[in-house]
Amino acid sequence: MTTGGAMVRTLEDVEFDAGDQLAALGQAVITTDVAGVIVYWNRAAEDLYGWTADEAIGQNIASLSVPEMAQDVAADIMAALRDGVPWSGGFPVRRKDGRVFPALVTDAGIYRGGTLVGIIGVSTNLGTALRPLLERSTDAALVLRSDAVVTYASPAVHELFGWQEEELVGGAIIPLLHEEDRLALASFLERVVTHPGAHPPVELRVRRGDSWVWAEAALTNLLDDPLVRGVVCNLRLSPGRLAREEAEAKAAQLETALESRLIIEQAKGYLAGRHGYPPEDAFQQLRRYARGHHLAIHDVSRRVVEGRIDLAP
């Protein structure tokens, strides 16, 4: 077609088909039949998952790329798709090398004459998409599904709490919480998923090694965000709790020091009154005995006052 002397090409002039277009996408595109057997696997899927198209086609998608931890969820998604309900969200998947990573997946049914004949899914590495947004923060960042399953964990989860990113993805956050705080977070998450946007933080205890620490959790509902499709949970050590614990520790140290000083003075007075030691000589007697018996001077002083040690000249 010519317009004003210039040649304008139309779609009819361009020779490419749907396969060419899907192959050119930067996102992984996978098509399966209704039973989940792979019938199409584009180049981006090869790059993302590690299997070539020849290796993938003919395999069941669940056994090929879904880790054991996510098999039940994958079955629920497939059931929903067969009922005509599309699905989108974060989901743990497995590469050929066995590594599990979070993917952002959108699945929809393919229909012919009103009958479901296949399922097409588009996926990308959720971690690659979210890291530039979340890893700049010093907080530990998690992306949760509405059922509290982790679909992404930032590197800071290890730095702050000792958690391994790859061990979190696909599992629920609940076991990481103190059992007395689990119900409270479940109720809070239930409220969050019904109201988009940011919510005030809550304090709860989370596991760090073999102990529990107080953390502040701020939840943001981004379930409708096409990039995130989840609830972002920013976790950091609770600044209020840390300040109170530090103040309590200093107060306890001061109280211990005062008690120690008091018992030493009592022991000096006891030795002065009972054996006539001048105060400085009494203190030297206490110190010599403590060093000679590998005891703390306040322990020696307490035993002197209780009459269990006699430091007579």
Image (cartoon, rainbow, N blue to C red):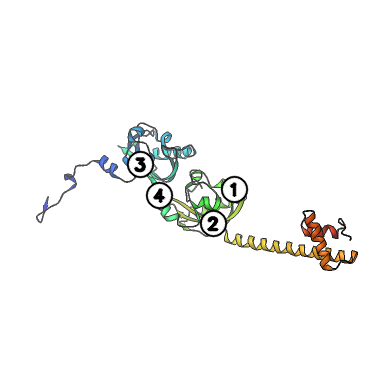
Q: Amino acid at mark 2?
A: Arg
Mark positioned earlier in the residue sequence (4 or 2)? 4
Q: Earlier in the sequence, mark 3 or mark 2?
A: 3
Q: Quick one: label 3, few (<14), some, or many (20+) residues within 10 Å?
A: some
**In the rendered image, which residue does mark 3 sit on?**
47
Can you give x and y, in whole percent of width and height, for residue 56 in the image?
A: 36, 34
Name the secondary structure under disc 3.
helix
Tell me whether the residue at label 1 lies in contact with that at label 4, contact meaning CB atoms closer than 8 angstroms: no
**Whole-percent x and y of residue 293?**
79, 53
Q: Amino acid at mark 4?
A: Thr
- The residue under the point 44% across, 39% down is 74
Of callouts 4 and 3, which one flags the residue occurring earlier in the amino acid sequence? Answer: 3
Report how far apart the C-alphas of labels 4 and 3 lie in the structure.
13 Å
Is 258 located above or below residue 108 in the figure? below
Q: Mark 3: which amino acid?
A: Asp
> Pointer 1: what residue?
209
Place residue 103 in its image quadrant: top left
Residue in the picture at 31% in, 40% down: 43
